[in-house]
Amino acid sequence: MKKNNKVIGCMLFFALLIITAGCGDDNKKSAYDTPKQGTINISVDESFEPVISEQIKVYESSYPETKIIASYKSEADCFRDLGKDSTRMIIVAKGLTKEEKQLFTDKLSYAPNFDILAYDAVSVIINKDAKDSVFTLQQLQDMLSGKDSSKNVVVDGNNATSTVRFLLDSVLRGKSFSSKVMAANGSKSVVDYVSKNADAIGFVGSSWVTNDQDPEQLAYRDKIRFALLECRRNCDSGSFAKPSQATITYGQYPLVRPLYYILKENSTGLGTGFTNYLNLERGQLVFRRSFLVPAKMYFGLRKSNVE
């Protein structure tokens, strides 16, 4: 009888070991994410918040077991987050330099993947009652540098934002902002300020103001309008253009910038799945519907005769 009890005890002990080992495997498996399940943290340039929040909504509705936690912040903060283990991916307005790529390669033992997803514009917005609505690039430079103080200039933050960096690089070209240039608390605050001040001129990412299907953006249309900027490419001399998919595509609008993803994932995880979605038809269509220009797919319509 005692012998049978020992045998039963041994069997129960080994059964418990097997169950415990199985639970350990399940916990280990749950620590890894896939394109269809799991949770990741990403950091996104605040000027792209409207379109990326829409992209995440579509992706998570397709794969209910996924959770993409996006933090919207300045471009500089996004790059700081990329150096942290907790952030898998960032979406910003520039890629990695050769030196930055090598730094991450040395740290991670593999190179982060990055590429252009779409093209955006820095929209110049004015109050609906503003008298001046047509500007050359020289006039914008004069206003940003303080040479022309006829407008209250407002941008989406300090030198850490992608919009400010773009203006410094592409408009001021080495010059500094005037001390009178105001730094709003994000793109929405820029739009709000311009909507309430007739002598204001603001600079924001186009996804905040060009989407005709966004009720909040439509509400601002009665209060703001787009400035027309000097066209220097693919247009007649003396022409001016406002931001649109057509003027971005053909280079007619002068303040165009790329939208990049940078992904540090050396396996087929949720970051890879979301990146593939952004690069393929559904993600590219969301960019198009948000009035950005898709970089990976062309959705133009062509006339044809069908007999």
Image: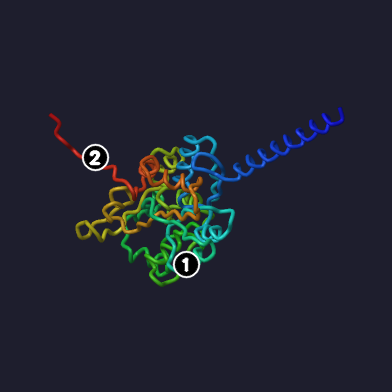
Residue occupying the far right of the picture = 2
Residue shown at the point (50%, 53%) measured from the top left: 265
Residue 13 seen: yes
| Residue 5 drawn above or below residue 77 | above
Per the image, label 2 sits on a secondary structure element best described as loop
Q: Quadrant of the C terminus?
A: top left
As shown in the figure, which amino acid type bears the numbered disc 1?
Gln
Residue 211 seen: no
Q: Nearer the viewer, residue 99 or 148?
A: 99
As shown in the figure, which amino acid type bears the numbered disc 2?
Leu
Instruction: Please tell me how crowded label 1 is: few (under 14), some (14-19), or many (20+) other residues with Cα within 10 Å.
Output: some
Q: Position of residue 263 (x, y in %)?
A: 48, 54
Residue occupying the far bottom of the picture = 174
Per the image, label 1 sits on a secondary structure element best described as helix
The residue labelled by disc 1 is 102
The residue labelled by disc 2 is 301
| Residue 158 drawn above or below residue 7 | below
* In the displayed structure image, the side of residue 235 where residue 123 appears, left or right: right
* Nearer-N-terminus badge (2/1): 1
* In the displayed structure image, the side of residue 52 where residue 306 appears, left or right: left
Residue occupying the far left of the picture = 307
| Residue 300 drawn above or below residue 121 | above
Q: Position of residue 245 (x, y in %)?
A: 31, 48
Q: Position of residue 75 (x, y in %)?
A: 49, 59
**Nearer to us: label 2 or label 1:** 1
Structure colour scheme: rainbow
Instruction: Please tell me how crowded label 2 is: few (under 14), some (14-19), or many (20+) other residues with Cα within 10 Å.
Output: few
Q: Position of residue 115 (x, y in %)?
A: 40, 55
Residue 28's label in the rendered image is none
Residue shown at the point (58%, 58%) measured from the top left: 84
Q: Nearer the viewer, residue 186 or 286?
A: 286
* In the displayed structure image, the side of residue 67 where residue 168 appears, left or right: left
